[in-house]
Image (spheres, rainbow, N blue to C red):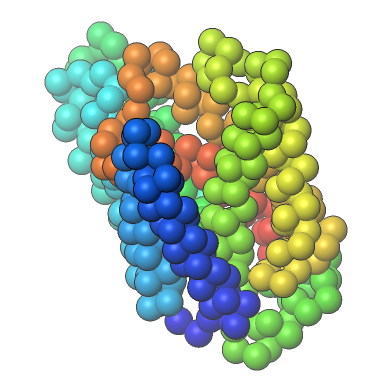
Amino acid sequence: MNLAPEVRSTMLSLFAALFVASLVSMALVRMKPNLDFAELRSRIRTWWVIVGLFCLCLYWSTTATICFFGFVSFLALKEFLSMTPTRRADRRVLFYAYLAVVFQYYLAARAWYGMFIVFIPVLMFVWIPTRMWMMGQTKGFLRAAGSLHWALMLTVFSISHAAFLLVLSPGDSPRIEPAGAYEQTANGFGAGPGLLLFLILVTELNDIFQYLWGKSIGRRKVAPSISPGKTYAGLVGGVLSTVIFSALVGPRLTLLDFRTSMMAGAIIGVAGFAGDLCLSALKRDLNIKDFGATLPGHGGVLDRVDSLIFTAPLFFHFVYYCYG
């Protein structure tokens, strides 16, 4: 893929940060041999794999990156369905749920916005309960239909917006015309990779910012029965830090100007917090700690993309409204 120099340098910065984190973890093991840093080192090793695969696909081609996110959706959907109770008859319907992953990402790859935006919320919303009543089993119908459609919305529809960013380009008459927006595309570099990298980077850093603020000065809990570690200080401090970071990075990495970068940071900060709590509430309801063990040190794929589930569609439509 023909990546802008800013995108390439940001990708190198990610590997540099992981290298520093690896050195720090090794130093901690030597300095404090009595403490157990196995989970920390496991998390860092998993981050190497995640970042490596993501950057490799992004560097390779748009198709490879879209397939990467499609595989993430497949794993997330599989985890969700394995953790939620289903009826024996529903297994015949699961085929269409997994098939929806392929079709949804095909629509993203073709940049077919009209069908992309209605396929799961409308067409699958109609087809899934229709296929269920055709089997003639009514017991547990509402729970089954609602759970399966919500699974598709969370794991496929929401995450696929991140993939669609790759093929999103500024319209002919954008409502907001930032400085430098068209220089980026005029020089042969598409806007999509920068937008995608910005979304992923800001979403993950928002989680880190909120964790650090909450641990350092957090006292009052936001939702103690759902996630005791979430505090108002973590929320406010994290969102403000995310807004500042977005304002600094957005104009350089994307077609967003200073003002829209700040707005995007605020959207991602609040949405990431809400997405994390939403998935935590789901785990509480299912009485599980993690959605799986696919990612050592992190849990399952859903545990890693919980914030992205909310930030991806909101950021996408914010950019689409401003420039589409």
Q: What percent of the width, then of the height, locates residue 109? A: 43, 67
| Of residues 238 and 321, the one drawn nearer to the viewer in this rendering | 238
Quarter of image, res 10 = bottom right
Q: What percent of the width, then of the height, locates residue 37? A: 36, 39
Task: Determine the residue positioned at 78% across, 52% down.
Answer: 244
**Quadrant of the rendering where the N terminus is positioned:** bottom left
Quarter of image, res 210 = top right
Task: Determine the residue positioned at 41% across, 36% down.
Answer: 303
209 vs 128, left or right, is: right
Task: Determine the residue positioned at 74% across, 81% down.
Answer: 182
Task: Determine the residue positioned at 47% across, 53% down.
Answer: 24
Examine the rendered structure and indicate whether residue 231 appears above or below residue 71.
Answer: above
| Of residues 302 and 221, the one drawn nearer to the viewer in this rendering | 221
Asked whether residue 73 appears in the rendered view, the answer is no
Examine the rendered structure and indicate whether residue 173 appears above or below residue 81.
Answer: below
Q: What percent of the width, then of the height, locates residue 43? A: 37, 45
Asked whether residue 278 appears in the rendered view, the answer is yes
Q: What percent of the width, then of the height, locates residue 111? A: 50, 66
| Of residues 235 and 199, the one drawn nearer to the viewer in this rendering | 235
Q: Residue furthest bottom?
A: 187
Quarter of image, res 184 = bottom right
